Image (cartoon, rainbow, N blue to C red):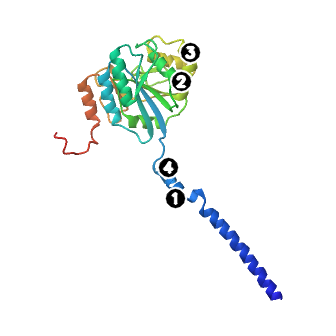
Amino acid sequence: MLRISLLQAILSTLAVALLIFFITFSIHYNSPSSTPTSKNMLLQETSHPQPHLSLLIGILTQPDRYDIRHFLRLVYGTQSSPIARIDVKFVLCKLTKQEQRVLVALEIIRFNDIIILNCSENMNSGKTYTYFSSLPRILSAPYDYVMKADDDVFLRLKPLALSLQILPRKDLYYGFVIPCPSMNPFVHYMSGMGFVLSWDLVEWISTSQIPANSTFGPEDKLVGEWLNRGNKAKNRISDKPAMYDYPGTNGRCSHDLIPDTVAVHRVKRWDQWLRVLSFFNVTKDIKPSKLYNV
């Protein structure tokens, strides 16, 4: 009888152990983390990481400059950066002609890259202020950085993103410091060829009375004055010599084209654009085809 009781106890213990094993195995096997769908999603996330930063480039231009906008769409549409999401928009003030209302509307439908501000076209009467101050209200989501650029500047998006990647995401003012010989970004202001503000500074511009009460005058210089008066932009970077004016156009702001370029300013003629685009070999990725008899 003792042996029978001992055998029954052993069998009962084994049964309980097997029951626990099967329950544990069943839970693990049916766990969401172990399903093929979840595994595939994880592989997709690691194979295609999210961009490290986001940048809005607002190119201030005029409604009637249809040709330059179409050209710049080609220039920037053929560039990309694996470390950043970069959106290029053309920034206009209110349209005043029926022709503009029709043709710019077609651009909006086709390209979705137009911002029309509530202002009258101007150079030194507040367009830059209106641009920055409007963004927190009109954008559906913030960017890490916002850039104001001229329509006669050639920006190389990948080097630009690489320059920004290592910089702070807060309180940042980045560009080409004026005057040209200066290397100290804390003394003066960044050239209008193209300067970058971190999103917190854009939000500050949209709410502070300092810029709101000082919108008339050389606008790029005013931006530097706003930041100084507000004790803002403690992180300031002047990216020389990677940013510069086209060779021979502006004294000490100009120098020869160099491989490590981020921006070339004052590219106004088609022969200048041809030289710049050829120097940086922007058509190197064109695929061979029998369709191109060149």
SS category of the residue bearing label 3: helix
Dot 3 corresponds to which residue?
Answer: 210
- Which residue: 64% across, 62% down? 27
Residue 10 appears in the figure: yes
- Return the disc, 4 or 3, that comes first in the chain's sequence: 4
Q: Nearer the viewer, residue 248 or 13?
A: 13
SS category of the residue bearing label 4: helix
SS category of the residue bearing label 2: helix
SS category of the residue bearing label 1: helix
Q: Nearer the viewer, mark 4 or mark 3?
A: 4
- Return the disc, 1 or 2, that comes first in the chain's sequence: 1
Dot 1 corresponds to which residue?
Answer: 36
From mark 1 to mark 2, how far is it between C-alphas?
A: 42 Å
- Which residue: 25% across, 30% down? 275
Q: Nearer the viewer, mark 3 or mark 1?
A: 1
From mark 3 to mark 2, how far is it between C-alphas?
A: 19 Å
Q: Nearer the viewer, residue 123 or 224?
A: 123
Instruction: Report x, y in % for residue 152.
Output: 33, 23
- Return the disc, 3 or 1, that comes first in the chain's sequence: 1
- The amino acid beneath tag 3 is Ile
